Each structure stands twice: as structure tokens, then as C-alpha cells.
Amino acid sequence: MVNQPIRITGAEVTDLRVPTSDQMLGSDPFHKQPDYSSALLHLDTDAGLRGVSVVFTVGAGTDWICHGIKDLCQLVIGSDLAEFSTAPINLYRRLIDHHQLRWLHDGVFRMAAGAVINALFDLWAKSLNKPLWKLLVDLEPEFIADCIDYRNIGDALTRDEAIHLLRRKRTNVATRETAMLARGPKAYCTAGWLGLSDDEILATIQRLQQQGFDSFKLKVGRDSDTDVRRIKFMREAIGPECNLMVDANQFWGIDEAKRHIERYRPFGLKWIEEPIARDDVMGYAELANTFADADFGLACGEHAASPVIFKQLLKRGAIKFCQIDAVRVAGVNDVLAIILMAAKYNIPVCPHGGGIALCNMIQHYGMWDQIAVSGQGQTQLVEYIDFLQDAVAHPVQVRDGCYVAPTAPGWGLEFHADFVRLHRFPNGEVWKNRPPSNQGTAFEA
Amino acid sequence: MVNQPIRITGAEVTDLRVPTSDQMLGSDPFHKQPDYSSALLHLDTDAGLRGVSVVFTVGAGTDWICHGIKDLCQLVIGSDLAEFSTAPINLYRRLIDHHQLRWLHDGVFRMAAGAVINALFDLWAKSLNKPLWKLLVDLEPEFIADCIDYRNIGDALTRDEAIHLLRRKRTNVATRETAMLARGPKAYCTAGWLGLSDDEILATIQRLQQQGFDSFKLKVGRDSDTDVRRIKFMREAIGPECNLMVDANQFWGIDEAKRHIERYRPFGLKWIEEPIARDDVMGYAELANTFADADFGLACGEHAASPVIFKQLLKRGAIKFCQIDAVRVAGVNDVLAIILMAAKYNIPVCPHGGGIALCNMIQHYGMWDQIAVSGQGQTQLVEYIDFLQDAVAHPVQVRDGCYVAPTAPGWGLEFHADFVRLHRFPNGEVWKNRPPSNQGTAFEA
């Protein structure tokens, strides 16, 4: 498929940060003043094409991920794209199972590995002039299945099962693709950030409703009375027919979560997101039992650090919504595995969006899932965050509350040079001109 | 307790690496050629004392942790030791719940946070002229209990339970302390590294037996026949009375683990260590059920990235040996929580040792556990690795197969200046003189 050899000649890693904490957008009980940020990777080639990926973060610490990405890029500089694209599992294993680096575990290491893998998928898709979702849709089931590392998830998904899941939707792929080019994945948006006043929330809802949204999320994690009042306020503002979800961002312990959530029963919520710690699989199972008869289900995944955590949550039936993230795990390979596991256990994939350009990536997974894996969009919702899109040449778009199918090659993550220049940390103009307390490493607050 | 204010004036972070891969010591199925390494932190003060800690690693990636430690040290430079020592939970929360950095998750971030916390505990103990275990033993139960973050583990351990667990051994503490000063925690050692020949293993066993060891570990993770042959060989070499443990270093999936372990039943093994992925709590539970009637139990923890993972394994009864590590989680605060949870569920604490100076740290936890928490040493075993002790001024010592209680102040982690100078990466002489393939970032192999 790749005609001319494309050699990777270098890597550029940029620490991009935006002082969003000024506006309290993105705020939740833990992330009180997030500065939406990204570790931005460009892989240069001798063919002029650049492979791009981002790791979305919330400010301080972006430099840790940049450091890791730079280190890992040594593994791919000098190699040909075809070495990667003939069998993406090889690079995946070379990174994740690296005999010395695997000691670093998940978190920064897995995110940095994902950045490299995602940039190579970007490059590959660009070399074929296809958006990333289309690259995935066009791959044979066997090829997709061979991108997955089954070592730790084989009890939940085998290669044969992966192929079977993909084959069963294969006949309708063309029809689904046409349909989704006309109307992309259904989107939802957070209207109730924790730092926003009632009036600001109302204005946000109205703006979103004008764009056709009927699904809204609210942050909780204040005192129980305040949270319940805000839920009630949101429900009244959007009416009984709209979807309403709440997100606690892991703020509670299990018993605390039970007390809080018990009061949420009357409001017809769709899901309760991250009520407890990101790695508390048994805790999720316990909460799922406690609230088995409630309208809502549990949702999580944006902080689930590995496919093994997803495996357990899905296998145990602990979550009813699988919130994949594009940059928390090790790139496309891990996400393919998670989406296929979700399909096997009939759990809708509802990707986590955010800050700088994460939505630009997850829309491709929404497309692939709804065309080729689940093959439907009735139960799926893809998160949409409506700011910082002026950073990129191909902003995400919504129409009638649905994503507009992306058509730019690769992830479509081309950043405006001006934006990068201004927001480069710590020397970009945006940061140079800030008072000292906000420079440094954002240790304030 | 601290009389004169001690101010932290600076931090020095050193990337120390030793080319142990030359000898295949430390080798296992994943870590084929480990270069035992450490991110070494020195906190300088205006009192002359230095707070020291290490994060043990296996080569490449040590620089990632160094980068993180340097960043976090900004949080403590300029502060007084008393700000930390009056309530260590405050710094713990400031790091782990940092509103922007918590996005980085476990792994590198939690390990770097642990380095800072551990160096402050070192400084505190030195200011009192006590070894770290003695500092812990002398702290009131309420003070220890207040070092713990119960947010995500409150369903397994409450503050009241922590105090109760500590109080119940309080009356015998002085007697136990005297006993353990005479004879420290019982130790075990790996004799069967994966890269060693039978003859090398035999020689190792003989040497260890001369030091009084009766408990030995073997790495598995080759083909099943080879593993079984090596287990049989080890059992015959050490005789039927000695303890024999095997360690798979997470090499298998669940079903694969079952097939392998089934063949291990006849050899009177004490434990099977890390048969599957570090975060597969449900997988451990499943294996524990499958082998409920076997002689051996499951052991893990050296790669368990957070107290939440330990909580689930302990609460569910999935492991029979709790292998705390001194540098994988966020320092003393996390380890206290894990040891207390293990005590609550009656699971023996068998700390994980290794490479550069990890044993020097875990011996303090063995002492504290066996004096003040479990209050006994019959069921506990502390790992001992018998190399690279020439790096430090206070090497760990064993006598009659038991650790000799450490008496140097703090962790006793003072490194010889020559060792540091030689092994500093990448500019120390040891690394300068190596062929290019071993320089770089150890991406070879």
C-alpha cells in the first residue's frame, strides 16, 4: 500500500500549554484549575509528510511526558514507515515490553509510548491520504486482530473472537460508512463545570441546544446538598427528555460514593462517571451491584491506565459505558483491543474528549466503532469539548448534535504555527507575559 | 522533636546505572538484561544533614524518574523539615492530589513523589539520630494513622482500625524491638536467575546456605518443560525442608498461568510470584480459586502501582503474601497503609528487594512490621539481593539467614562518592568506556 519508502528522519516534541484556568473551564473536584495542555509530537520524514500526535494533559507535568516521548523516539528515527505499517504490533511490543523501560509502568510511560504509536498511525494514514478512521475501517479483520497484544487480556478476547466481531459487521460496512459520512457520531458536552455559576451553566446549555445537543454532563464532587441542587437545576434546565450524566472525577471512596449516588436516583441520569478511584475494579463491581436497579449505569475509562483494567471492568459487568481515551493507553493498538472487548461484552463505547485536540482524535474511534465494530450509533455517545479548536487547521465540527465525519488525512491534528509559537511552555509569549506565580511549573494552588 | 529548624536548601538528583546485564544477574523473562540502576535524590539542608532516597530501576528510563523528581523537589525546597514532620500527610496530598500533576497517574509520577517523601522521612529520622524503622516504631499509633490517605481505601482500612491494629501490639513493642535487634527479619534470596546455568545456580545456593539461608527463589517463564525441570533441580539442590518460591514476573496470561502452575503442585512450593499482569486483580482472584487446595499461595506487589491495587488483592483474599516495594508507590505513607491493610487481612508482609539499595530500604519496613504491626516474624520473609552493596557506606548484612537490624540513621543510604562518580549516567567512567551500543539509552536488545 505504501509505494515509496518513507523514512523517519527526526522528531520534534513541543510542550504546549494554554492558561485555561483563568476561565475555570475544565474544572472538577480534583482538577481545580486545569491549564489544558498537550505534549505535541511531530515525526519528520524524508517524504515531506509529518506524523503528528498529542498527549492531552492539564498543565504541569506535560514536560514529563515530553521527556519520555523524546527518549522513545530514538526507537523509530531512522526506520521506514513500512517497518511499522506491515505489523504495528512489533513496535507496540518493542515499546511496552521493552526489557528495561517496562519497569516505568503505566502513566507517563504508557502515554509516551502511545504518542509514538499514534504519530506513526497518523503518518501511515496520511501516506494513504485517508483519515484515520478510514484506514482502520479498510483494514482486514485479521490485520486488526494482529495489532493486539493478547498476553494479558486473552481470557476476555482471543484473536479468533476479534476477527469474528469484525466479520459480523463486515457486510454492512459500506452502508454504515455512507450513513456516518452524512451524520457522524452523536455527541454530548459538559455544560456544568464545577467552577461555573448557574447563569454560566444556563448560557452554556442554551448555546449547546442551538447546536442540536440533547446530552449534557455535570461535574459533581462538592457537598452532597450542593451537588443534588445542581443536578436538579440541570435537569430542569434541559427538560425530562434530554440525557443527563454526572461526573465525580474519582472524588469519592466507595461508601461515600454510595451515600452520594443514592440521592441521585430520582433524576433520570444516564450515567455516573468515575465515582471512585480509576483502578478500583472491585469497587466498581460493588457499586454496580448496589445500584443494579437504578436508571443509571456506571461509566469510566478516561483514567483507566491499561487494557487490563478495562478487561476486568467489562468482564465483570461493572460499567455500562466504556469511556476510552485516545492518549491514556498505548495508542491505537490498545484502543482497538478495548473497543473490541467492549463489543464482546455489549457495552457501548463512549470516548472521553477534552482540551487540546483530544476530540480531534476520539472522533476517529467513534467512527470506526460505529461503522465496523458495534456497527451502530444508538447506544454510543462521543464526548465533545467546544474550546481551543482555533488551535488546529481542522477543527472538530458538530451538526445537529452529531460530529461531522472528519475527512482530513490522518488524525487531522495539524496545529496552527502561531498557536504553537504563542503557547509553547515556558517560553511562548502567552507564558512569558504571565505573572511569575503562573509560570514555573504551575505548583500554585 | 526537631529542635533547631532545618531548612531544605536544594536538591541533587543523580541517574546512577550499573551494567549488571554483563553478568545476567537480575534477569527474568521480561527483564532480559537489566542494568540495575537508581534515581538517587539528595535533599540538602542548612543544617548539614542530607535527606537521601533512591528509586530502584533496571536501566533505561531512570532519566524519566530523575526528571520528575527534579520537578517535584521545587515543592519542598525552601520549606522547613518541621512543616513535613508535623503532618506528613500534607506533603503526600500536595504531591499525589496535585490538581495538575495527578493527571500523570501512577508509574513515573507516583515513584517520583515517593522519592521526595522518602528523602524527607530520611532527613527526619537523621535529625532524631534514629534509623527509619525506629522512627516509625516510636511514633504514636494516632500519628501513624494520620499519615494515611483513606480516600480510596476506607472500605478496607479506617483510621480507627489502623490505630487499633497498632495498639494491640503496643505493649510488646519493647520486647520485640530487643529481640529484633539481636536477630532481624528472616531473609530469602533468588538463586535461580533466568540467565544462570545450573552450575551457577548451584554455586549460588551453596554460598547462600553458608550464610544461613533456607529460603530460595527461582525465576520461571521459559517453556513449561524447562521451568519444571529447573524447579525440580532447585528442589533437589536445596532439599525438602527449605522454602522454595518461583517468580514468573507477569509473563503469563490467566489461562497460560493455570496450565503452567498446575504442573508445579508436586514440589512443595511456598509461593508463585507475579504469575499474571500486575493490575489483574480479578485474574489473581481466579487463580487463587483454582489453586485453593495447593500447597502454595500467590504473591505479588512489587509492581502494584497503588494502595488501591493492594486493597483489592488483600480484601478479596487473592494473595497469600504481600510483597510491598519501597519505591513503586508514593513512599512511606503508602507503604504504611499497605502494611496495615495486610495486617488487617492477616496476610504476611514479604517485601520486595533488589538492585541498588532497595534492600537497604525494605529492611526498615520488615523491622517496623515485625515489631509494631504483625509483631512477629514467623510468617514473614524479606527479600535479600546480595550484590552492589559495595555502593553504600552501610551495606545490608545477613547473619544466620536473617537481616542484621540496621542502626545507621535514616534509611542508611549513604553512597560512596567514588561509586556515584563512576556510575553516573551517561558521563560516569563506567559508561564512557563502554561500546556505543550500551551507551545511549539502552535500547539495544
Image (cartoon, coloured by chain):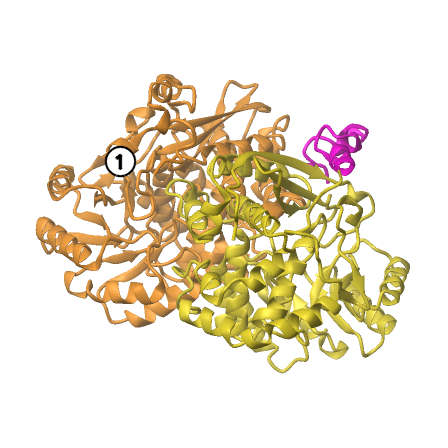
Chain colours: A orange, B yellow
Residue B432's x, y, as percent?
A: 78, 28
Toward the bottom, the furthest residue is B293
Q: Is residue A231 left or right of residue A437?
A: left
Q: Is residue B6 above or below residue A79?
A: below
Q: Quadrant of residue B94?
A: top left
Q: Is residue B126 left or right of residue A422?
A: right
In the image, A190 versus B10, the foreground residue is B10
Residue B415's x, y, as percent?
A: 72, 42
Q: Is residue A117 left or right of residue A412?
A: right
Which quadrant holds the C terminus of chain B? top right
Chain under callout 1:
A
* Identity of the residue drawn at 60% across and 55% down: B326
Kindly identify the amino acid type of the residue bearing the numbered disc 1. Val
Q: Quadrant of residue A292?
A: bottom left
Residue B411 included in the magenta stretch of the image = no
Q: Which residues are magenta?
A: B417-445
Q: Quadrant of residue B37?
A: top right
